[in-house]
């Protein structure tokens, strides 16, 4: 099978072509695993964290990718949840202990980091972490929902906002453009304010219904009950805190932060940023329950992800565009043939 593999970690500036196309054997599903013939795989910012060593894979080479959509083609011994021909998706959670807080468990394993992921024509995964894809979505539409959307669903829940309370989003890429659609459905009376350094992102946010869009460093027209930060930088964390109302919460939706602007943390002022019981909460990984619940909710709304596609062999270019911030919405790799996709 064709696969794009990461052989070494390092700054993308020093290795702009980090992935290599190779031929690998088609994996065999083990006990309670399914073999998936992959149709598409979304491109996520966490892949940059893996490539650049902020959350390095424990072994190399590795097949990246954790927004996977495909068809079950073979069942391992003991599989009861899926049949051959089922269309399923796989997100960041590859395996864990199955507990309520499995995202925090020491047994948590990530797709495309701790086990081979979706930048390939086939992959295996435990049946509990392959999720049925609602019929309303095409393969390309479903891919961003498996991570950008599902982790956004978890982040929105962690804000603890109620309907009518104002919400802020910092950064407006693959996750935030899905979260705003979810927020508008769950909290229809809550105005959404967007902070983004790129004018194109701000315009995109307004098109999707934000009541205001400004630069990362600007003050919102009103204080906000909660803000979700989806950026890889530190400056938005500090800037967001000044826009929270007393008792407000900043939810940081990122696996890792880059060090480029870490000195901005020195500008954190207790009185203006933290006092009055403002708080910061991180989002750690994802649970299987988050993905299953979100896919059902997304189909009900229905959420319409904005995406661009390219071929599997163009994964390096897609990653570079993601690094440069030149993607509107999400990026999806076409892995299988047109006959494989819905």
Image (cartoon, rainbow, N blue to C red):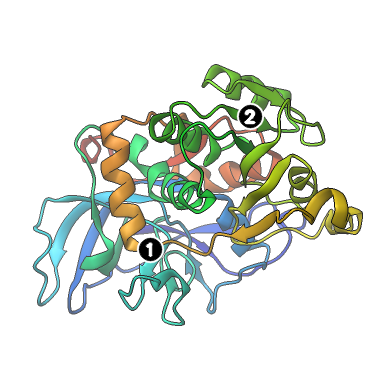
Identify the residue at image location x=79%, y=31%.
219
Identify the disc placed on residue 177: none
| Image coordinates for residue 100, horizontal then vertical, percent | 34, 70
Label 2 SS:
strand
| Image coordinates for residue 262, horizontal then vertical, percent | 83, 58
Report which quarter residue 170 is drawn in. top right
| Image coordinates for residue 271, horizontal then vertical, percent | 87, 53
Q: Is residue 130 above or below residue 321?
A: below
Is any part of residue 201 visible from this angle? yes
Label 1 SS:
loop
Left or right, 147 with reference to 252: left
User: Which quarter of the rendered picture does the N terminus lie within?
Assistant: bottom left
Are discs 2 and 1 less than 8 Å apart at CB? no
For disc 1, the neighbor class at 10 Å (few under 14, some 14 to 19, many from 20) is many
User: Which quarter of the rendered picture does the C terminus lie within?
Assistant: top left
Report which quarter residue 35 is drawn in. bottom left
Is any part of residue 23 visible from this angle? no
> Which of disc 1 and disc 2 is earlier in sequence?
2
The residue lying furthest to the bottom in this view is: 106
Q: Nearer the viewer, residue 92 or 216?
A: 216
Report the number of discs: 2
Identify the residue at image location x=80%, y=60%.
259
Left or right, 311 with reference to 290: right
Q: Which residue matches tag 2?
A: 193
Left or right, 303 with reference to 49: left
For disc 2, the neighbor class at 10 Å (few under 14, some 14 to 19, many from 20) is many
Q: Nearer the viewer, mark 2 or mark 1?
A: 2
Identify the residue at image location x=36%, y=75%.
96
The span from disc 2 to disc 1 (Cα, nearest Å) is 28 Å
Q: Nearer the viewer, residue 118 or 49?
A: 49
Report which quarter residue 36 is drawn in. bottom left
Identify the disc placed on residue 287: 1
């Amino acid at each position: 099978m064709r696969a794009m593999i990461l052989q070494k970690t390092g700054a993308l500036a020093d290795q702009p072509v980090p992935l290599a196309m190779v031929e690998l054997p088609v994996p065999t599903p083990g006990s309670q695993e399914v073999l998936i013939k992959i149709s598409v795989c979304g491109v996520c910012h966490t892949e940059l964290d893996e490539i650049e060593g902020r959350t390095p894979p424990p072994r190399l080479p590795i097949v990246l990718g954790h927004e996977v959509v495909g068809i079950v083609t073979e069942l391992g011994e003991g599989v009861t949840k899926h049949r051959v021909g089922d269309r399923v998706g796989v997100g960041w959670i590859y395996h864990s202990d199955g507990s309520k807080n499995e995202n925090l468990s020491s047994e948590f394993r990530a797709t495309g980091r701790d086990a081979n992921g979706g930048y390939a024509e086939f992959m295996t995964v435990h049946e509990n972490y392959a999720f049925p894809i609602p019929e309303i979505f095409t393969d390309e539409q479903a891919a961003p929902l498996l991570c950008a959307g599902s982790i956004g669903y978890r982040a929105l829940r962690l804000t603890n906002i109620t309907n009518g309370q104002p919400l802020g989003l910092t950064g407006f890429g693959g996750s935030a453009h899905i979260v705003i659609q979810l927020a508008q459905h769950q909290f229809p009376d809550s105005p959404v304010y967007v902070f983004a350094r790129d004018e194109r992102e701000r315009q995109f946010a307004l098109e999707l219904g934000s009541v205001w869009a400004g630069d990362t460093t600007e003050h919102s027209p009103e204080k906000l009950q909660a803000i979700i930060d989806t950026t890889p930088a530190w400056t938005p964390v500090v800037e967001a805190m000044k826009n929270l109302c007393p008792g407000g919460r900043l939810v940081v939706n990122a696996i890792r932060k880059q060090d480029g602007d870490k000195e901005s943390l020195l500008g954190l002022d207790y009185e203006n940023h933290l006092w009055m019981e403002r708080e910061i909460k991180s989002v750690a990984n994802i649970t299987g329950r988050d993905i299953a619940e979100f896919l059902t909710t997304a189909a009900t709304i229905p959420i319409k992800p904005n995406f661009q596609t390219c071929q599997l062999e163009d994964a390096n270019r897609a990653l570079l565009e993601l690094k440069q911030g030149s993607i509107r919405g999400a990026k999806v790799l076409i892995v299988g043939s047109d006959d494989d996709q819905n």
